[in-house]
Amino acid sequence: MLEIKNLHARIVDDGTEIIRGLDLTVKAGEVAAIMGPNGSGKSTLSYILAGREDYEVTEGDILYNGQSILEMDPAERATAGIFLAFQYPMEIPGVATMEFLKVAMNEQRKARGEEPLKIPEFLKRVKDAAGLLNMDMNMLKRPLNVGFSGGEKKRAEILQMKLLEPKLCVLDETDSGLDIDALKIVADGVNALRSPDRAIVVITHYQRLLEHIVPDSVHVLYKGQVIKSGDKSLALDLETNGYAGVIGQAA
Amino acid sequence: MPAVQETIDRVRKIDVDQYKYGFQTEIEMDKAPKGLSEEIIRFISAKKGEPDWMLEWRLGAYRRWLTLEEPTWARVHYPKIDFQDIHYYAAPKSTPGPKSLSEVDPELLKVYEKLGIPLKEQEILAGVQKTEESELEEANDNVYKSGRVAVDAVFDSVSVVTTFKKELAEAGVIFCSISEAIREHPELVQKYLGSVVPTSDNFYATLNSAVFTDGSFVFVPKGVRCPMELSTYFRINEKNTGQFERTLIIAEEGAYVSYLEGCTAPQRDENQLHAAVVELIALDDAEIKYSTVQNWYPGDAEGKGGIYNFVTKRGDCRGDRSKISWTQVETGSAITWKYPSCILRGDDSSGEFYSIAVSNGYQQVDSGTKMIHLGKNTSSRIISKGIAAGYSQNTYRGQVSAHRKATNARNFTNCDSLLIGDQCGAHTVPYMEAKNATAQFEHEATTSKISEDQKFYVMQRGIPEEEAIALIVNGFVKDVIQQLPMEFAVEAQKLIGISLEGSVG
Ligand SMILES: Nc1ncnc2c1ncn2[C@@H]1O[C@H](COP(=O)(O)OP(=O)(O)O)[C@@H](O)[C@H]1O
Ligand SMILES: [Mg+2]
């Protein structure tokens, strides 16, 4: 589903190369974990997947279902089924969460040539999804992410993900800022989305989340490259021995 | 809240250079030759069958105007206006007093249809009652209540259709064109006209006093709550016709009225001058809400053409505990020069100003308010949201003053500016003056740019760039939108989306 080939990317503003020859393949139905120390380029990779203009791809390609997505803008990629749960979700003052959800869902429907959702149907979907995530409907009247706690923001991301039903889900440090109960709820939410036609990329630098969302593959990102891949035991290994060992091998 | 969705649909339908309301109708005009003189003023007055006192009042203003200079203090630039190159009178050849839709000029009905905003005219004229509440609106914390609206259409200077007159009359409310009021209710007009904006007030207001051709008149008697929203369309239709509307609204003791003004204008090459005067008078315990959605042609992509909008709007809280509230959404015009103000004369009176001013292309907006505290325990509130895009300049100019006897005057001012792109400018020019030590004035101002982070985040959910900006901007102006009656709120959100079109990429 996702094939990243020898990807090189730099910051447009100052030309600094952040992603330096990254290769990664994730199949439909797979849950891939990307781990790596702070500053290794995990968030940058997620932004580049989502089409952020601050980064320029200088070499390599990103194929999604066999097609290069490099020429697509973020909205087009989203509509094609790529979803990014942000490490730091943005506040959108004055736009009720509910309103935002409706616009996003209907925009995607429109792009696919579908009718906008009828209001009762929309409400039903939101209520169901919010219920599963243990979210209060009252919170959804508030402007998106404004004054939300760290945990509420992360839940709101997962709520959006559930409602938009993407095919490629990228979760950037969704576990940070969550207490153990919230972590479980969020992980259940993600697990419920596991399906043979969907790929999930979980970015984290702790093993903790992976106890709840058990990955099929684990990839270590360091200095803009995948330096080691393995199965879930690699995550455990990292937990016990730290990144130093892996980094040492690669160097 | 389907509004944002509609904004998106609307934005999609329109090409960049195509101003949606840029069409011309073919209603025959009956107009005065170009130029301004005592003769022209006599012609206007005679055309309207006015009494002598009205003619004298006009002539007095005209003589005064001859001694005045055009003001230059606003942050707007435009070529010198040739006041002799303007037609001061144009009237559709109307059959007098249409009694039903079938009697109304079909061209005019077509115009209504094309306007489509802020109300479906056909429905209104037919008296259709709307109920558009939904669970979603509730979920979104909206308090909008749909209702009926009476429309007094000002079609290039003359009121053509007035609806709902009967029901209003039963309530004792007078809602008609100012010309009709001059004929039918001369005592009221004579008593109040010019009592808030005197003929000598300023260059444009003085000009208006001399040559105003039409506008609306509202009188709500003591203790009456006007049973519906009152609405007027202003629409500039004839080439080179200066628009000099005059509106006078009086709410007697304990009365309440909500008035909506909305504008669209056809596209054209030459600049058009608009210099309206609006006077509001609220007596003891009365309340007037005045809402405007202004969407005149702003000029083409190079900034050519477009309306010059020099408006004087002022409300007089003449009575104790009276309240006047201005809400405006300004998206159109090449130049906007407009400061809806409140004179807080009565004790415990209050004034409000809620404003959204959107500028794009080469538009220049210099707008704001004055809150003049004269009575005791008076309060005022100013919420201004300026959005500048393209090469536009957007200035908030506000004045809050408390006079010597105005003990416990309170004001809260909040001015936020949002910049889209880096070729535009936002400016805040607040003046505060308290001659009474007990005054409490609070002022907050922010200027921000639409952040790339926000835009990326919104787009990541599948919302295309222009819609993403419209969504973020509509969030930014939400506090003001909520002050509008629902019909206008929906419309305003659409207009904001439309007017920001082409502001990116
Ligand atoms: N837009 C940017 N401007 C400047 N530096 C950036 C930018 N994006 C990423 N970086 C830098 O690139 C490196 C990788 O960052 P990031 O992708 O956030 O790492 P991670 O998510 O793995 O912690 C860091 O050194 C960070 O400071
Ligand atoms: Mg990160």
Image: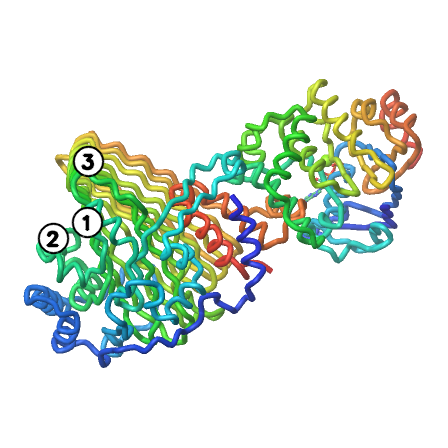
Q: Foreground residue, B227 or B504?
A: B227
Please say if A227 is above or below B500. above
| Residue B336 pos. (x, y %) | 34, 60
Q: State the SS at label 2.
A: helix
Chain letter behind tag 1? B
Q: Which residue is mark 3?
A: B285
Mark 2 touching mark 1, by CB under 8 A? yes
Query: First in sequence: mark 3 or mark 1?
Result: 1
Q: Are marks 3 and 1 on the same chain?
A: yes
Disc 1 residue type (three-letter): Phe
Q: Are marks 2 and 3 on the same chain?
A: yes
Instruction: Report whether residue B278 is seen.
Output: yes
Q: Which residue is mark 2?
A: B188
Ligand 2 resides in the quarter of the picture at top right
Neighbours of disc 3 within 10 Å: few (<14), some (14-19), many (20+)? many
Q: State the SS at label 1.
A: strand
